[in-house]
Amino acid sequence: MNGYCISVAADQARAFWIAEPGRGEIRLERLPDPAPHEILVRARFSGISRGTEALVFAGHVPASQRERMRAPFQIGDFPAPIKYGYASVGQVERGPRDLQDRTVFALYPHQTRFVLPAAAVHLVPEGVPPERAVLAANLETAINGLWDARPHVGDRIAVVGGGTVGCLVAWLARQLPGAEVELIDTNPSRAAVARALGVAFASPAVARSGADVVIHASGSAAGLELALNIAGFEATVVEMSWYGDRVVPLSLGENFHARRLTVRSSQVGTVPEAQRARWDSRRRMTLALTMLADPALDVLITGESAFDAMPEVMARLAAAPGDTLCHRIRYEPVDARGSGVLGNGAL
């Protein structure tokens, strides 16, 4: 990558910004002094949520959803310039004694160091490697989706779409006693991922019909059509895909009414009603982080790049993701050494 060396002061950080739809850059930012209720975190890894972040990178967040789609520590407004992201794992450099030097997860954009309220971070359990903890936000989404689906013991569960969230939903569902779980995807390479996660795999052409529960996470109209076609009598299809500003057709003819199907949306911003009296987002995230102790989930990390390469990485993933599931960003402690590299166009 072409770049140039600069001096990075102790009160500065580097952050990835979407400068305009389809173009990213790394910018220098001045860090505020942490207030008594705040902490300073040095990032070690972050994860790119390929589906949502690709839509944001390309500028496809519809005006009606811009407020709803804001990330917790987003800076800027859609479509751009904007600092966006929500899967950062780092080490506390300054903060309360019980957090000092601890590894934490935060719903923070891609940035080398950052200041945020201590209450906004989640401790990464001892048995969870920080490299794997970047999956926490995706797993939290998968947990919420399965809560919305409300499967039962022994159900036949079909998951259409083998992206990161779809794979995590299938992995969660197969832990239900007696459940038969089938992960369905057009990409034959997902068969190896399904095996590693302990679930069956099928292409759309041979997917089993008559499922008790169908969870759709492919982000495509064809996937949603398949989900409706394989759902059994009075089954529920949970729609987890987010399409941004695209209009997606929904086939409500043929057998839709005769089979009395239900289509239900799922969105991680709200805890489902059945759990809401006892669960909040913090308890849900704690559960997700605890469940990441399973090393089988490493199969979902399909690539890693240095932070300095983020402008090129995001452009590539948005245009041609290929077999990518979760792409991990690695941060070097350049701020501590006093130097770093900025890509072309950095400020």
Image (cartoon, rainbow, N blue to C red):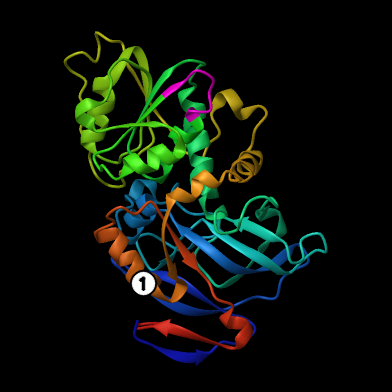
Q: Quadrant of residue 187?
A: top left
In the figure, is residue 127 to the left or right of 294?
right
Residue name at image x 21 percent, y 20 percent: 252
Q: In this rendered view, identify the residue nearer to me: 28 or 309.
A: 309
In the rendered image, which residue does mark 1 sit on? 311
Overall secondary structure of the magenta section:
loop
Which image quadrant: the N terminus? Answer: bottom left
Residue 162 visible in rendering: no
Residue name at image x 24 percent, y 33 percent: 203
Q: Secondary structure at mark 1?
A: helix
Q: Which residues are magenta?
A: 173-180
| Amino acid tagged 1 | Pro
Q: Quadrant of residue 180?
A: top left
The 10 Å Cα crowd at callout 1, few under 14, some 14 to 19, many 20 or more, is many
Residue name at image x 56 percent, y 87 percent: 8
Q: In this rendered view, identify the residue nearer to me: 293 or 343.
A: 293
In the figure, is residue 101 to the left or right of 151?
right
Instruction: Examine the structure image and report whether residue 259 is included in the region drawn in magenta.
Output: no
Measured along the vertical axis of the image, is residue 88 above or below residue 34?
above
Q: Position of residue 177 (x, y in %)?
A: 54, 20
Residue 326 visible in rendering: yes
Q: Position of residue 156 (x, y in %)?
A: 40, 18
Residue name at image x 23 percent, y 21 percent: 229
Q: Quadrant of residue 155?
A: top left
Q: In this rendered view, identify the residue nearer to me: 17 or 292.
A: 292
Measured along the vertical axis of the image, is residue 151 above or below residue 198?
above
Which image quadrant: the C terminus? Answer: bottom left
